[in-house]
């Protein structure tokens, strides 16, 4: 329910720049997520906090050992591609390799989520329900889903430009124009994406309500959580699955098209940024908590 949707260690790494910040943020991830997400959504008591932090530390140890090497390899592969023109197939292959790590990561949260859910009270479920409702409103506002098509396109374009400039630096006016056209042709459907987001959270809420109401044994609670986690990885909605697959391919094509317009200087900057991320990951792999 909680961390599988919010916890992306790779995203955390990419959001930070200096190695010291990465090490600090990564190693304090359990406390950060407790403070920034879990407690606002569940209002945990001291006993629950202690158990959750212990569980998250175990997940962090597993992640450092099992997944950071995969990230380092992926970032190195991206560096090898960055100096040259790329194809949509190459971009998709990179994305697939990165997302392959998601399933084993989510499965690490099966038992901790079931254990926490089994300790929740009806009042805490109401807190979660209220926060999800607020999250839905915030999402609609962020993506301007109640605004005009033009306003929604501006959000897509701005987010795309921000992501691209993290790697390439300032885009030229021609590249900005291309990015806007790519966003316009992306096939993104805000309401459909929003509906799937709601589906995931509503299903999550329903699972936790059943656990709180029925108080099953931990193994049974784990099975219920596992079923929900599988629906995170593979939507039960065939229509959305087809839409998601098409969008993924379109995004690969768009990423390749934009990359192939970049200058040697922009590509060199992308290599430098990717190398910095790889160095950060390898630093974390070597880090020994005191």
Image (cartoon, grey):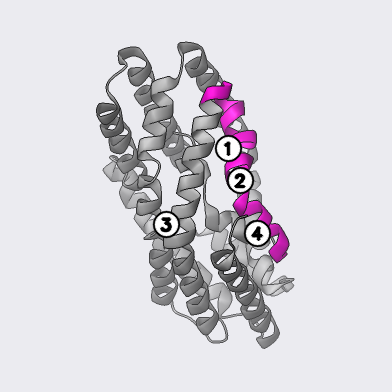
| Residue designated by label 2 | 152
Does the residue at mark 1 contact the one at mark 2 (Cβ under 8 Å)?
yes
**153 or 215: which is nearer to us?**
215
Does the residue at mark 3 contact the one at mark 4 (Cβ under 8 Å)?
no
Secondary structure beneath label 1:
loop
Going from N to C along the chain, the mark reached first, 2 or 3, is: 2
Quarter the N terminus occupies: top left
| Residue designated by label 3 | 247
Does the residue at mark 4 contact the one at mark 2 (Cβ under 8 Å)?
no
Q: Which mark is residue 23?
A: 4
Left or right of 3, for residue 273 = right
Going from N to C along the chain, the mark reached first, 1 or 2, is: 1
Going from N to C along the chain, the mark reached first, 1 or 3, is: 1
| Residue designated by label 1 | 145
| Image-quadrant location for residue 173 | bottom right
Going from N to C along the chain, the mark reached first, 4 or 2, is: 4
Alpha carbons under labels 4 and 1: distance apart? 37 Å
Alpha carbons under labels 3 and 4: distance apart? 34 Å
Secondary structure beneath label 2:
helix
Crowding near pointer 2: few (<14 within 10 Å), some, many (20+)? many
Going from N to C along the chain, the mark reached first, 3 or 4, is: 4
Q: Nearer the viewer, mark 4 or mark 1?
A: 4
Q: Which mark is residue 118?
A: none
Residue stretch in magenta = 18-47
Alpha carbons under labels 4 and 2: distance apart? 36 Å
Crowding near pointer 4: few (<14 within 10 Å), some, many (20+)? some
Residue 165 in picture, x, y percent from top left: 69, 67
Crowding near pointer 1: few (<14 within 10 Å), some, many (20+)? some
Alpha carbons under labels 1 and 3: distance apart? 18 Å
Residue 163, compared with residue 4, is above or below; it is below
Quarter the C terminus occupies: bottom right
């Amino acid at each position: 329910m909680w961390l599988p949707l919010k916890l992306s260690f790779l995203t955390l790494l990419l959001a930070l720049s200096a190695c010291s910040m990465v090490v600090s943020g990564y190693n304090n991830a359990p406390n950060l997520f407790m403070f920034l997400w879990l407690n606002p959504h569940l209002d945990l008591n001291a006993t629950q906090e202690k158990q959750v932090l212990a569980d998250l530390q175990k997940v962090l140890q597993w992640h450092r050992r099992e997944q950071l090497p995969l990230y380092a390899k992926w970032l190195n592969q991206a560096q090898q591609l960055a100096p040259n023109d790329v194809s949509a197939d190459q971009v998709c292959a990179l994305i697939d390799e990165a997302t392959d790590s998601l399933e084993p990561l989510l499965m690490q949260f099966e038992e901790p989520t079931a254990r926490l859910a089994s300790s929740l009270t009806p009042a805490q479920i109401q807190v979660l329900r209220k926060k999800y409702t607020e999250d839905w409103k915030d999402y609609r506002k962020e993506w301007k889903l109640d605004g005009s098509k033009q306003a929604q396109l501006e959000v897509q374009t701005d987010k795309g430009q921000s992501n691209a400039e993290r790697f390439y630096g300032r885009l030229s006016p021609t590249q900005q124009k291309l990015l806007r056209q790519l966003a316009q042709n992306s096939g993104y459907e805000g309401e459909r994406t929003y509906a799937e987001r709601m589906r995931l959270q509503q299903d999550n809420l329903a699972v936790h309500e059943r656990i709180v109401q029925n108080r099953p044994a931990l193994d049974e609670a784990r099975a219920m959580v596992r079923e929900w986690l599988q629906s995170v990885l593979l939507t039960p909605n065939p229509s959305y699955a087809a839409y998601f697959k098409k969008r993924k391919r379109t995004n690969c094509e768009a990423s390749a098209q934009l990359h192939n317009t970049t200058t040697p200087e922009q590509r060199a900057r992308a290599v430098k940024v990717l190398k910095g991320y790889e160095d950060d990951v390898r630093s974390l792999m070597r880090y020994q908590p005191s």
